[in-house]
Amino acid sequence: MADDKLPPGDDPVYSRKVLEMITVANEYCLFLEKAEEYSPEELLNFLQKISPLIYLKSALLPDIIVDDEDAVEHYVNEEQWEYLFNVLYNKFGEKDQFYFVDLRENSHHDPVKGSLAESFTDIYQDLKDFLLLYQKPLKAFKENAVNECRRLFETRYGSRLINAQAAIHAIQYPEEDSTIF
């Protein structure tokens, strides 16, 4: 393929925007993999700061044309997901649950119950799969990693980031007479 002969700097798969996303996603995943070591306050402080970065870097990912759509793999299994979810759920305790309005639903005026642990574990799964797929040596895997990450941002974890970010904001900066938490 002629595409494989392009210098990395000229190929969107190796662009600065992708490398910055890799950096932020890696920081997020490494931190959550050590979530047991942190207090609930440290977790919330980290998530409050990295969530907007993940959102921004994901929104800036280039649109990649994928040559081989079959070069996609998923790595985070159910046991890993469940383990991280339980760690986060136990850390967040009573602050785990929040309500949000899902604007994608027809009944977008009814609040929906959300979970910080579930949201951040789902985001972890998407970003960890992105990182591990991107590390594969063939360019086709890298193309699919970026393409899948962008697709999942648009359809799944982007809105989860926003909803969870709003919940964290309410926890971090409660109103004087707030009964949310």
Image: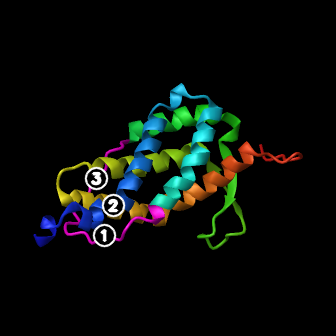
Q: Position of residue 149 (x, y in %)?
A: 38, 59
Q: In this rendering, is residue 64 above or below 181?
A: below
Q: Position of residue 129 (x, y in %)?
A: 35, 49
| Distance in Å between CA atoms under marks 3 and 2 | 8 Å
Question: Which element type, helix, strand or loop, lies under badge 2?
Answer: helix
| Distance in Å between CA atoms under marks 3 and 1 | 13 Å
What residue lies at 48% left-to-right and 50% top-to-bottom? 123
What residue lies at 12% left-to-right and 66% top-to-bottom? 5
Is residue 71 at least partly visible in the picture? no
Q: Are marks 1 and 2 in contact (CB under 8 Å)?
A: yes
What is the three-letter code of the residue carrying label 1?
Ile
Q: Position of residue 19 (x, y in %)?
A: 35, 55
Q: Is residue 112 left or right of residue 123?
A: right
Q: Splitting the image into 4 quarters, where does residue 100 fall?
A: bottom right
Mark 2 Cα-neighbour bin, 10 Å: few <14, some 14–19, many ≥20: many
Magenta stretch? 58-77
What is the three-letter code of the residue carrying label 2?
Val
User: In the rendered image, which residue does mark 1 sit on?
Assistant: 64
The residue positioned farthest toward the top in the image shown: 37
Q: In this rendering, is residue 14 above or below 109?
A: above
